[in-house]
Image: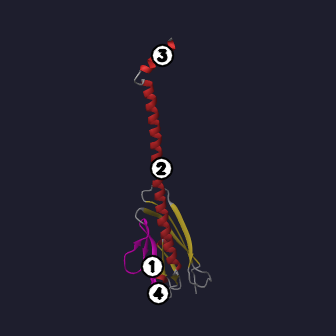
Amino acid sequence: MLGKNFIQRKRNQKGVSLIELLVAMSVFVLISGVVSGLLISGIRSQRHTLASRQLLDQTSFALEYMSRALRMAIKDDSVGCITPGTNYEITSGGAGIKFINHLEGDQCQEFFLGGAQLMHDKGDGNPSLPLTSDKLEVTNLNFDLAGDASGDNLQPRATVAFSVQDADKNWPAIKMQTTVSQRNLDE
């Protein structure tokens, strides 16, 4: 009899108990929290990926642009742009390099660190232009020369190394380095 009354009373109940309500709300809040956490984590990861990609794209462009220009350097046989008989000249205590770019009408050009940006002076009388955006900060720029002395029978090589980070400093800096040699034989 006891079982029959219990079942009958259970069928007549139209609501839910407080415990059932608390369990249902707890499960809902837990699932909502997990889904929200995953969504926020995905958005942060996407933002980090986009910032890293922008950083790599811009530094790759700057490095390729400088490499192409430095590869086309020619020896200065006049007294003007750089020391006569050399292909490159280090400026700004190693944070800049001057050369004559044969690719652009034998203009005296220079790459250097201007503030927190990588700058390019084309030597045409116009102001220097930045190679990196203002959203990036170049923290270190260094040029090194090898084989540039006259009579050393070595092909001149210029090494470019720099560190770049997000201007907001949200992500770690990346370091890039390359060495280029002059395209034409050094005579």
Residue under pointer 1: 109
Task: Residue type at mark 1: give it.
Answer: Gln
Magenta segment boundaries in residue numbering: 104-132
Residue under pointer 4: 79
Nearer to us of marks 2 and 3 is: 3
Residue under pointer 2: 42
Label 1: few (<14), some or many (≥20) within 10 Å? many
Of residues 35 and 101, which is closer to you in this image? 35
Q: CA distance from mark 1 to mark 2?
A: 45 Å
Please provide percent x and percent y for residue 12. Answer: 42, 20
Label located before the other in sequence (4 or 3)? 3
Of residues 187 and 50, which is closer to you in this image? 50
Task: Residue type at mark 3: give it.
Answer: Phe
**What residue is shown at x 45% (from left), y 76% (from top)?**
110
Nearer to us of marks 1 and 4 is: 1
Q: CA distance from mark 2 to mark 4?
A: 59 Å
Q: CA distance from mark 1 to mark 4?
A: 15 Å
Is residue 160 positioned above or below 125 on the image? Answer: above
Task: Residue type at mark 2: give it.
Answer: Gly
Query: Horizontally, is 82 left or right of 124 in the view?
Result: right
Label located before the other in sequence (1 or 2)? 2
Label located before the other in sequence (1 or 4)? 4
Please provide percent x and percent y for residue 121. Answer: 42, 76
Q: CA distance from mark 4 to mark 3?
A: 109 Å
- Please tell me the numbered disc located at residue 6: 3
Is residue 29 positioned above or below 105 on the image? Answer: above
